[in-house]
Amino acid sequence: MIKSMTGYGRGQAEIDGLSFSVEIKAVNHRYGDVNIKSPRLLAPLENEIKKQVSAVLKRGKIDLFISQEHTTQLANKPIVDRQVAKAYIEAFRDLHEVSGLPGEISLEFLAAQKDVLVLKDVEFARDDLWNCLSLALKNALNSIQEMRQKEGAATQVDIENRLNLLSGSIELIEQSAALVPMEWQQKLRDRLARLQENGGDPQRVAQEIAIFADRCDISEEIIRFNSHLSQFSDLLQQQDPVGRQLDFLVQELNREANTIGSKSNDATLTRHVVKLKSELEKIREQVQNIE
């Protein structure tokens, strides 16, 4: 069954004190484009993240937002920069000697100086990070897939209804097209009779009849149109992503409809073609959102 390209999913996981939250947002895109915003400690895992996402979401502009939740394990911790602290102590001693002023350096005063205490990222084992993150990512992917499948199911129902309308319209076009040459033949016969009365060339009129019959013949276009409709219906039942194939078929259906319209020399036939193209445009809009 088809899936929508748009959707939202969220997942969370906690393992051995590590906790990650993952949000996924997806919108229409011609190809698969995965963008990741995550804490710096996850930078080495970016390729694995993209692989896991791309294996599930084949098309769409996909934005991932990954955050590390507060747990018993800290993501970073304060570290004393011993070199900076010693430099401050030496500077204060020099200042004491130069000024001759009394005073003692307190621990609180020293700790308050810039860069004496710095936050350092806590290092985690790569496997520990991935085990927790991949579970949160899996949960988020399951969530967005459920939403995309629901939207895809609703889209499929709408498209199938419109395909039925297209089948009805092309059948009416075929019926109307069969009558057009007969009507024009009668008109040309009447013209031939008048030309014969006036000494006209009956052979030229016969040639015009043959030329018109060939020009207004749309049997091949109707056959191809019905073939494309059948392929379209089959693709809607596939499990793999078919958005690009459906988009191509809509273009081919439009091509045949345009050719039928250009050969149309009858008001009734033209009305059917306009209706045909209107439904095709609605299907084209829906196809743009199919994975």
Image (spheres, rainbow, N blue to C red):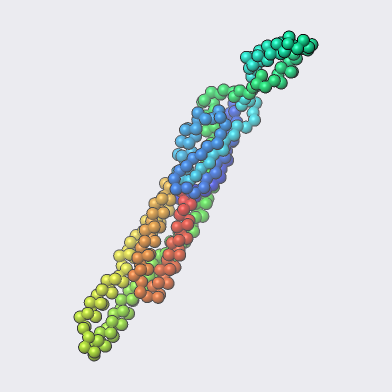
Horizontal side of 151 relative to 202 (left or right) equals right
Residue projecting furthest to the right: 102
Q: Residue at x 34, y 60 (%)?
A: 227
Asked if residue 287 shows in the view, the reply is yes
Please determine whether, in this image, residue 43 is positioned above or below residue 108.
below
Left/right placement of residue 100 relative to residue 13 reads right
Residue 132 location in percent, x, y?
55, 30
Image position of 282 with respect to 55: above or below: below
Toward the viewer: 14 or 286?
286
Tell me residue 120's x, y (percent). Answer: 61, 23
User: In terms of depth relative to the viewer, which is nearer, 201 or 290?
Assistant: 201
Extreme residue toward the front, this view: 98
Give the residue drawn at x 37%, y 68%. 261
Q: Position of residue 241 (x, y in %)?
A: 43, 47
For the image, the number of numbered tags is: 0
Position in image of residue 226 (x %, y %): 36, 62
Residue shown at 69% from the left, 20% from the top:
113
Is residue 132 visible in the rendered image? The answer is: no
Position of residue 116 relative to residue 155, above or below, is above
Position of 193 relative to 207 (above/below): below
Quick check: 58 left or right of 38? left
**What residue is drawn where x is 25% and y is 77%?**
208
